[in-house]
Amino acid sequence: MRKPARMGVFERYLTLWVALCILAGILLGQLIPALFQTLGAATLAQVNLPVALLVWLMIVPMLLKIDLAALRQVGRHWRGIATTVGVNWLVKPFSMALLGWLFIGHLFRAWLPAAQIDGYMAGLILLAAAPARRWSSSGPTWSRASRISPSRRWR
């Protein structure tokens, strides 16, 4: 039996790196606000271009790893696919709308700009319906940490 791969430094301290990046972003935003205002204003059809570029840089490597020959076997796993689609599109958006209503609509409403409340709600609902982004960063890390093969999840 093959010994599972050990987590690297990046995966092991992922929470620390995220926290450091958040702090760095806050600090840089305070030190050079004009740069970040320019980046924030770089939009096309209400889509922020720097964010769009970074999302594509995150997604394209995953797309290149798709085994196109394995797509013929998708029909064999229809229960898992149906469950995933049902949870992602029927449960998550509505549960996130409920949480958004509670937290954004009531608990934190006083601290948020009134004109942006609907945007925050829409963002939360879209975030709930975007499982690929979350899986791309956390799934492989937790699979290695728990020593569970991702291919065994639907058995």
Image (spheres, grey):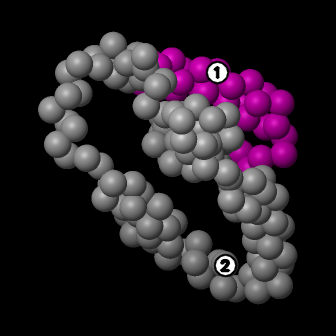
Magenta-colored span? 87-114
Kind of residue sitting beneath label 2: Phe
Which residue is depicted at the point 29% across and 49% down? 66
Give the residue number, with chain letter if any, for mark 1.
98
Kind of residue sitting beneath label 1: Leu
Q: Is residue 126 visible?
A: no
Q: Is residue 92 visible?
A: yes
Q: Quadrant of residue 118?
A: top right
- Residue nearest the viewer, comparing 83 with 89: 83
Which residue is depicted at the point 23% across and 27% down? 74
The spot of residue 108 in percent (x, y) is 82, 37
Q: Earlier in the sequence, mark 2 or mark 1?
A: 2
Which residue is depicted at the point 20% across and 28% down? 73
26 left or right, relative to 69: right
The spot of residue 46 in percent (x, y) is 44, 61
Q: Is residue 105 magenta?
A: yes
The spot of residue 113 in percent (x, y) is 74, 50
Q: Say the numbered circle drawn on residue 36.
A: 2
